[in-house]
Amino acid sequence: MTDEIDVKELEDVVVRFSGDSGDGMQLAGNIFSTISATVGNGISTFPDYPADIRAPQGSLTGVSGFQVHVGEDKVYTPGDKCDVLVAMNAAALKTQYRYAKPGATIIIDTDAFGPNDLKKAEFKSNDYLGEMGIDPDRVVACPLTQMVKSCLADEGMDNKSILKCRNMFAVGLVCWLFNRDLNLVAQFLREKFAKKPAIAEANIKVVRAGYDYGANTHASTPGTYRIETKHKVPGRYMDITGNKATAYGLIAAAEKAGLRLYLGSYPITPATDILHELSKHKSLGVITVQAEDELAAAASAIGASFAGALAATSTSGPGICLKSEAMNLAVIDELPLVVIDVQRGGPSTGLPTKSEQTDLLQVLYGRNGESPMPVIAATSPTDCFDAAFMAAKIALEHLTPVVLLTDAFIANGSSAWRLPDINKLPDIHPHYATPDQAGHYTPFERDPETKVRYWAIPGQEGFTHILGGLEKDEHTGAISTNPENHNLMVHERAEKVALIPVPDLEVEGDKDDADLLIVGFGSTYGHLHSAMMQLRKEGYKVALAQLKYVNPLPKNTADVLLKYNKVVVAEQNLGQLAAVLRAKVDNFVPYQYNEVKGQPFVVAELVKNFKEIIQKA
């Protein structure tokens, strides 16, 4: 008689893979998130990279993590803490256990917990579980390295190549624990290693070994788990990162506008993947240039814009500093340009692999002169597609540079994305000069209602003109130092941006009678939404307003903010959005919740702090 194992259904689960930065934890997490998205589960991921280029093996600073939250319905965050922690070595257990729930299952490779490993991880004794207060009954202690070596003994692989497959054993074990289809894993690996089929098959063999280990030993657990998809919407889905979604949004915008896409960029963490992704799509007419520096990257994009392309440049905070001179050139020339700022920890090189929202004031005001520029902040990995598309649409239709703010959290994180029908995306109509302007065209003739100048492409007969960094006469386009003309042009550039129509600010939750309104912008949406929902479950009346369009602000912003007795502005900086809103909205005096840890918000901490605000007299 065979033992039967219980299969329980869960609403959601959080799994965290952790190990040395060379242990393939990002790939392991990507596989689990991709196959979960493929079967229709909601997912949210958080890759947590070390800042060291290559820390010593087994060291505390070299641990790389990847957290995956999988749910039967939409999930909004990668989760505060994990239900399952995979720790590939002693350092991973030491640094990552704080992210595990009290009753979490811990999977460890006992072969990576030898005396030398424990010393590197700064354990004081061989009783590492006791030292950390971990119940051994919750630990799946597996001689993972030795089992992988045995599994691949007949494959003719060298020891280094065999050890690179250790992460796949952990993937197989987690797939067994959550009833995942190994055929989906095999398909993923064969596609990833299409040019190295032997490597693909070796990894697949190890995945199956990990799965069988769990099935044969029951892996110290009373049962396995299944997460069904609650609301299935027909369509094609993929697990997509924010950077890839940003690239796809630009491609879609170029298609709708009938233009070629040009990206001028310089590699910088965590924005480089946008350049990598767009460079793969030459067949769609995409042009990518890796310039020698940030200023050259932006300047080349401005040249492409002048020539009639949809032009973009991508970077992170330090690169925005360096691009600012060129961005101002796009402002005074009134040329369409999408500037993508994937925010990271600062100042200076700061925390290059971590996430913050500390560039807001820089992109709003960090240039010389009066330099108004629309700013859009994406709210999730999948929203990066829509935000990039809308940034391009605004740039082309209003002839202005537009800043798209994302950050490391959503740029590297991923969600399940339903591929859109491009025919259902909004049309994009660049604000071209009209044929009847030929022969008497001047570059700063404007639409009287929108203040948008007319865009003429070089080479069109009758539309000869010059643009440049010096102020121009409103009527002739010639260089002008006339005080009244400069005053007029400054006002018209500002008015043009202020007149750009953006959607109203929406309020979620108890919008009519909330005791507290939570206000945020950009990537914190998932955590703030989850905190609001938790507070409402506990009987509090709470609402949320998340800003996606920061400049110009939605027209109803003041009405929303002044409607509630208590408002808290929550952001991952020291109060930049709160400062902007106080400057823009008379008599607005909010509470503030500010964290600058390089990590996403923790929902439990948000709930605790928001309760304290509600309960204040």
Image (cartoon, rainbow, N blue to C red):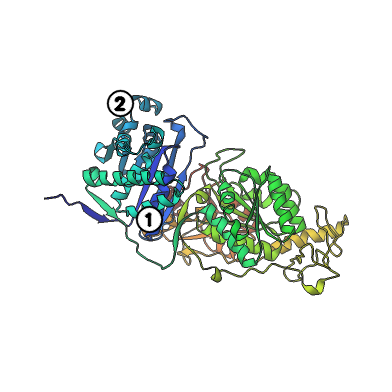
Q: CA distance from mark 1 to mark 2?
A: 37 Å
Give the residue at mark 2.
126
In the rendering, which numbered label is found on residue 160? none
Residue 325 in percent (x, y) is at 73, 47
In x, y percent, where is residue 118? 36, 27
Q: Which residue lies under the disc numbered 1? A: 36
Check disc 2 and give the amino acid type.
Asn
Is 492 in front, or is 57? 57
What is the residue that sits farthest to the left in this orientation? Answer: 1
Upstream in sequence: badge 1 or badge 2: 1
- Confirm whether residue 366 shows in the render: no
Q: Amino acid at mark 1?
A: Ser
Q: Quadrant of residue 294?
A: top right
- Where disc 1 sits, the SS reads helix
Residue most toward the bottom?
A: 436
Question: Left or right: where does residue 57 sit relative to residue 246?
Answer: left
